[in-house]
Amino acid sequence: MKFIIKNIDTGMFFQRRTMTLLDGSVKMKIQELVEHLESSEIIIEEPKCNFDVEMAMNMLDDAEKMSAVLLFSGDSDLVSPLERLKVKGKKIGVCGVRNKVAGELHAVKDKYLDFGKLYTGKRAYIESENPAFGGTA
């Protein structure tokens, strides 16, 4: 298993959006924690994700059990296993976000679903809802 060394910063603990909701004293405590961790020479590592490789292996292992694959990704790393499945007569569907799907996936797909047309949730964080700006998130 491979590991990735992580940079110690506020982003390890909070998203930038969340930081805008915190008051100055809390931000200062977080910055003190970050500085303490940096000065202690602690190295934080996390396992490198091999999810696309695992998906490809599972698709190929189970090829005889399926008639089609619906991939929720735009990652071109999955083109080779999808091409193998297509040669075996499997239908290939790709569900992705417009302009975020690799051209190679479009070349191998039988059907494309634009996730943006399926998604019905909130599309953007509206600044007026942010309590830091007087809203009530």
Image (spheres, grey):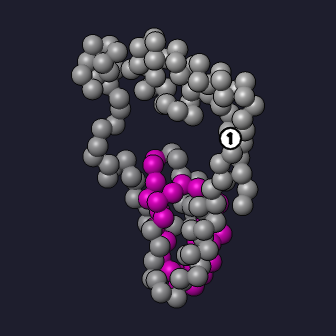
Q: Is residue 76 visible?
A: no
15 and 92: which is toward the camera: 15
Reply above or below: 123 against 24: below
Side of 74 relative to 93 (left or right): right
- The quarter in which the C terminus is drawn is top left
Side of 103 relative to 92 (left or right): right
Instruction: State yes or no: residue 54 in magenta.
Output: no
> Percent position (x, y) of residue 37?
66, 28
Q: Residue furthest bottom?
A: 64
Side of 15 relative to 50 (left or right): left
> Percent position (x, y) of residue 85?
57, 78
Q: Give the residue drawn at x 55%, y 75%.
A: 59
> Percent position (x, y) of residue 45?
69, 45
Reply above or below: 109 against 44: below
Q: Is residue 129 visible?
A: yes
58 and 16: which is toward the camera: 16
Q: Give the residue drawn at x 72%, y 24%.
A: 39
81 and 133: which is toward the camera: 133
**Three-letter code, disc 1:** Ile
Reply above or below: 129 against 7: above
Q: Give SS at disc 1.
A: strand
Q: Give the residue drawn at x 45%, y 83%.
A: 67
30 and 134: which is toward the camera: 30
What stretch of residues is rendered in magenta?
71-98
Q: Give the residue drawn at x 51%, y 45%.
A: 99
- The quarter in which the N terminus is drawn is bottom right
- Figure quadrant of residue 58: bottom right
Residue, disc 1: 44
